[in-house]
Amino acid sequence: MAFIKEFQTVSEIKGPLLFVEGVEGAGYDELVRIRTADGDLTGKVLDARKGMAVVQVFEGTFGVSKQARVRFTGDVVRLGVGSDMVGRVFDGLGRPIDGGLQPKPEEKLEITGAALNPVSRSVPQDFIQTGVSTIDVMNTLVRGQKLPIFSGSGLPHNKLAVQIARQATVKGTEGFNVIFGAMGITSEEAKFFIREFERTGAIEHSTLFLNLADDPAIERLMTPRMALTAAEYLAYEQGMHILVILTDLTNYCEALREISAAREEIPGRRGYPGYMYTDLATLYERAGRVHGRTGSITQMPFLTMPNDDMTHPIPDLTGYITEGQVVLSRALHRRGIYPPINPLPSLSRLMNQGIGEGKTRDDHYGVSNQLYAFYAEGMDLRNLVAIVGEAALGAKDRQILKFANDFEDRFIRQGFHENRSVEVSLDIAWDLFSEVPETELKKIKTQFIERHLKQKGKTDGSEGNSK
C-alpha cells in the first residue's frame, strides 16, 4: 500500500471531523491514519475540495490537537472477511469483542459494496419462515426481500429481532445464516443480544456487529456497512442464504444528521440531510438475489418511529425504498399482546412470490385475505361500540367483533419462545373461521372451506363463497 505524503496542517476540529489544508489528490472515502500524542487513529475522507480535505475520525476527535499528523493511504476502508466470521461477535468497526482473536481474512472487501447491475438481479422468492404467525401468514417474508419493522420507543422490537434471528429458516436449503447489526444500543441491550444468541445456540449460525450508544457517531455509520459486507461475502462467495437484521436504523439516521450538522450542510426535512434517502438506499439495495449465484441476502431492518409517526422522514423514506413494512402497535402492547404486530398497516409487497402450493400451502392466499377482512371490519365495529355500545350491534356484527378479539388473543399473541410453523399458523386461522358463519368466508375458495371445515364438522354446503 503506497502512502501519500503526510500532512500536519489541521486547520479546524469540529465534532468527529478534521479539516486538513493543503491536500491535493485525496479521494472520496479514502482511508486516513491520524498520528496523535496519545496514539494512532483512523478515519476516512468525507469530502475533498481544492486544497482541503474533510476527514471523519472513527474513534472520535477527543484529545486530538491541530498538531496531529494526517496520512492519506490511497486505499479505502475494507473489512477482512472469511467463513470463520460465523459464530463471532464484533464491534461496529469489525473488531472482535468476544475474547477471540481477529479472524484470518480470506479476502479484504470494500465496505461500500459493489453496485449490482439491475439486470443481474433475479426476482425475490422462496418462503422464509420466521415462526411468527402474523408475519408468516399475513406479511410473508421471501428470500431476497427487504422488509423493515416499524416500531416505537418502548416497544419490544429487540425481543422480536432476536426471536426472528433465532427462528428464521428457509425450507429445503442449507447454510442459512444471520448477520445481526445493532447501532446505538445500550450496554444492557448488547448483553441481552449476546446472551440470547448464546443461550439458544443461534450464535452458531450468526455473526454479530454491535455498536454501543457511547461509541463515536461515525462508527454508527460504518456498522451496517460492515455487516452487509460480511453478508455479501457469505452469500455470493460462500453460497449461503443470509438474513441481515439491522437495528436501530433511527440511531443510524441520527448519527447521519449529527455528521451533517458538523459539516454545516443545509438541512432537509426535520434537520436530516437532504441526501438521507440516497444514503439509506445504499444500505437497503444491498439485499437481493443475483443470477448465477447460489446465495442470497434478505434484509429486515428495524427502526423506531419518533412519536409513533409513520410520516416521519426515516420511516417515510424507508417505505419508498423497501418492499413493504411490518408495523408494531402500541395499543396491542398495552394490552399485553406479544408480538404487538398490527396487520392492518403492515404489508409485504412480495408476499405472493413466496406463498402457495409447494411453498407454503394452497389455501394461504385466501386465508390471509379473509383474516385481514374480518380484522379490519372488527376494528371498525370496536370503534362503533365505543360510541353506541355493543347492545346496538346485530348478531353478525357481534360475531365479527368476537372474531377480532379472538384473532388478537389466539393468532397475533404468541410467546417469545414459541416457534410456530406456517402450517400451525394456518390451522389456528381455520380454528377462528370455524366460529363464524360459513357464508361470511367470501375471500376463500369453496374447495378449501370444505376441506378444512369439514374436518371440524362445520360445513353446511352453502354456496355463498367465491369460486
Image: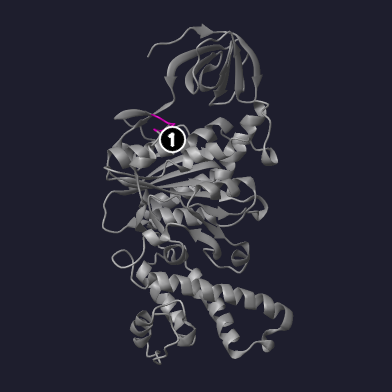
In-image side of 411 versus 310 (left or right): left
Residue under label 1, please give it.
226
Question: Which residue appears at 33% of the width and 37% of the height?
Answer: 233
Quadrant, the N terminus: top left
Question: Which residue appears at 34% of the width and 86% of the height?
Answer: 455
The magenta segment: 110-114
Q: Check the image and name the residue furthest to the right.
A: 387
Question: Which residue appears at 43% of the width and 33% of the height?
Answer: 94
At which x and y percent is residue 337?
A: 55, 68
Between 175 and 37, the residue placed more toward the observer is 175
At which x and y percent is residue 51?
A: 59, 10
Question: Which element carries disc 1, helix, strand or loop?
Answer: helix
Amino acid carrying label 1: it is: Met
Q: Is residue 80 magenta?
A: no
Q: Check the image and name the residue furthest to the bottom.
A: 460
In-image side of 223 versus 305 (left or right): left
Q: Quadrant of residue 95?
A: top left
The colour style of the image is one colour
Disc 1 crowd rating (10 Å Cα; few below 14, some 14-19, many 20+) is many
At which x and y percent is residue 180?
A: 43, 45
Question: Which residue appears at 68% of the width and 34% of the height?
Answer: 267
At which x and y percent is residue 400?
A: 56, 82
In this rendering, is residue 428 above or below 339?
Answer: below
Quadrant, the C terminus: bottom left
From this viewpoint, is residue 341 visible?
Answer: no
Q: Quadrant of residue 129?
A: bottom left
Question: Overall secondary structure of the magenta stretch?
Answer: loop
From this viewpoint, is residue 249 visible?
Answer: yes
In this rendering, is residue 71 above or below 95?
Answer: above
Number of marks in the image? 1
In-image side of 132 versus 81 (left or right): right
